[in-house]
Image: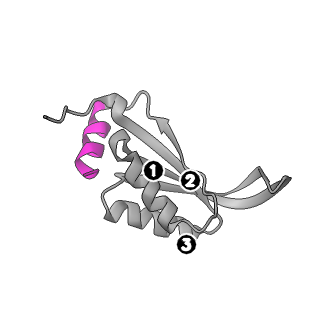
């Protein structure tokens, strides 16, 4: 069975949040070192509001934007679940619609 070449629709952005910038930096470093992401951007701090234990909560968080390929999502999720300090971390994958061919080629070269 041969593996098909990746197409532009294979690019995804995975989102996760952390309470501390150091945690975001540690997750980014681990994802990059394992070649699970080509790029991880850390934004914040920002304010998040959410339901937790039947109450509306708010927290200051940092957002990680993880650029990867759809076929590596399970590995990204596994690593995040292993290393993330939250009991129930946000892990959301979105398709990267409209990605440039050159950026996608670079992404594919980084994500092994």
* Residue 72 is covered by the magenta coloring: no
First of labels 2, 1 by sequence position: 2
* Residue 108 is covered by the magenta coloring: yes
Disc 2 designates what residue? Answer: 16
Q: Quadrant of residue 71?
A: top left
Dot 2 falls on a residue whose secondary structure is strand
Residue drawn where x is 55% and y is 72% of the image: 22
- The residue furthest right is 55
Real-space Cα separation, disc 3 to disc 1, in angstroms:
16 Å
Residue drawn where x is 40% and y is 66% of the image: 30
Mark 1 crowdedness (10 Å alpha carbons): few <14, some 14-19, many ≥20: many
Q: Tell which of 46 and 71 is nearer to you.
A: 71
First of labels 3, 1 by sequence position: 3
Q: Is 29 displayed left or right of 35 in the figure?
A: right
Real-space Cα separation, disc 2 to disc 3, in angstroms:
14 Å
Relative to residue 91, is residue 3 depicted above or below? Answer: above
Q: Is 66 displayed left or right of 52 in the figure?
A: left
Magenta stretch secondary structure, dominant: helix
Disc 3 designates what residue? Answer: 22
């Amino acid at each position: 069975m041969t593996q098909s070449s990746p197409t532009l629709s294979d690019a995804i952005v995975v989102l996760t949040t952390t309470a501390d910038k150091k945690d975001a930096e540690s997750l980014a470093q681990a994802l990059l070192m394992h070649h699970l992401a080509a790029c991880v951007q850390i934004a914040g701090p920002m304010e998040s509001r959410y339901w937790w234990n039947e109450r509306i909560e708010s927290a200051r968080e940092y957002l990680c934007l993880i650029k990867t390929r759809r076929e590596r999502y399970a590995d990204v999720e596994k690593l995040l679940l292993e290393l993330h300090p939250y009991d129930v971390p946000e892990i959301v994958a979105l398709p990267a619609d409209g990605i440039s061919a050159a950026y996608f080629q670079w992404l594919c070269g980084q994500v092994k």
